[in-house]
Amino acid sequence: MAESVLLNDRYQLEEALGSGGMANVYRARDVVLDRLVAVKVLRKEYSDDENFQKQFWLEARSAANLSHPNIVTVHDFGVANGLLYIVMEYIDGKDLKRLIRERGRFPYEQGIPLMIQACAGVGYAHRAGLVHCDIKPHNMLVSKDMRLKVTDFGIARALATIKPGERSDVVWGSPLYFAPEQAVGEAPTPASDVYSLGITLYELLAGAPPFTASSADELARLHISARPLPLSEYVPDIPPALEEIVMKVLSKEPAARYRTADQLGRVLQKFGTAPPPAPKQTPASAPTVITVNPEIAERLTHSGAPAPQYVQPEVAPQPYQIPYSPPITRTGPAPAYREEEEYVPQIDWITIGLGLLALLAWGGLLPFGLAIYFSYFPPK
């Protein structure tokens, strides 16, 4: 479809944004609401398939009911000139695949926030009962302020209605990213989207997908049976915890992965917000500078060499300990007795005087008592 075409008297095509095996994407203007939109026009071979048309309407309605900051909003869909089209929110940016090609691998500090946003959008769709089925960096649009939005919900499921004999590599155009269960023809589940998110995360961090091959069949075999190279082979300084998360997401069995995109997003959020362990530091003390003897320094200065300075090495502070003093023992003869050292007790004359008075009193009463006794009992 040529540019400058007016679809259904409403959408004025302005510029081609991209072209793929199943559709062409245009920047257009909604002349009714006077706003920029993105219009995806499907190729004729898909638009003419009745089964695809029916499923496309169902999936487009489901996608239009999704309202989330990390999902491209679907505004409208219809048919013009015998071609199916879908009108979406216009994102002024690039898809994640193009960014990876331009920049190479992303540092995990920049890549994790993008994947957290992708998980938030896909997780919201999972809670609404919708499986994307075609998660890949091509379907993740990144604006200039690094806001990521997932697009093309439901289109892959609509493509699954085409008869097996009519399928082509273009229809199943995401063998780099589909899950092992999708490779063997099983119905995709939220765990399948999680696997595709893991492949995208791997490519984002390593700069290349974990599996590459010359044919879709070989790629399917690798997804089913091959083990991806550890991320540390590409990025030696990647945190081991992050590498473990990626390898868990890429498990062959769906039950071994994170169950939903929300769960994966929470794990990445926890990893991304955890502060790195701070290196242990010991308080540095100012070094003691010991200068050289002035005479030597003067001779060195006159000779043209700078006066050296000796910096005393820092010594780690030690805990204070009370010094031990052994008991003093005498080994020589005992010292001579000195008279001034003899203890002389003090005499308490008041106490002595009172004692004498008591004794005299007792001595005076004794004769008086004897006289009384003999007066009653005279001796015979």
Image (cartoon, rainbow, N blue to C red):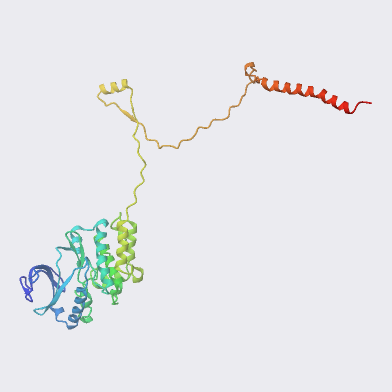
Q: Nearer the viewer, residue 192 or 163?
A: 192
User: In which image quadrant can residue 24 be found?
Assistant: bottom left
Q: Name above or below for residue 142 compared with residue 343.
A: below
Q: Quadrant of residue 157?
A: bottom left
**What residue is shown at x 29% (from left), y 67% (from top)?**
261
* 150, 10: nearer the viewer: 10
- The foreground one among 15 and 200 is 15
Q: Position of residue 80 (x, y in %)?
A: 9, 78
Question: Measured from the top left, where is residue 20 in percent x and y?
Answer: 15, 71
Q: Quadrant of the N terminus?
A: bottom left
Q: Residue furthest left?
A: 4
Instruction: Decide which of 376, 310 is in the foreground and name it.
Output: 376
The relative height of residue 321 versus residue 355 in the rendered view (above or below) is below
From the top left corner, tell me how far across and down residue 266 is, in percent: 31, 63
The quadrant where residue 155 appears: bottom left
Q: Residue at x 16, y 78 (%)?
A: 46
Q: Is residue 83 above or below residue 266?
A: below
Q: Residue at x 22, y 82 (%)?
A: 163
- Tell me where residue 268 appears, x and y as whole percent: 30, 61
Could you tell me if residue 218 is visible in this image?
no
Q: Residue furthest top?
A: 339
Q: Residue furthest bottom?
A: 50
The residue positioned 46% from the left and 35% from the top of the image is: 320
Exactly how many numbered labels are in the figure?
0
Q: Quadrant of the C terminus?
A: top right
Left or right relative to 298: residue 358: right
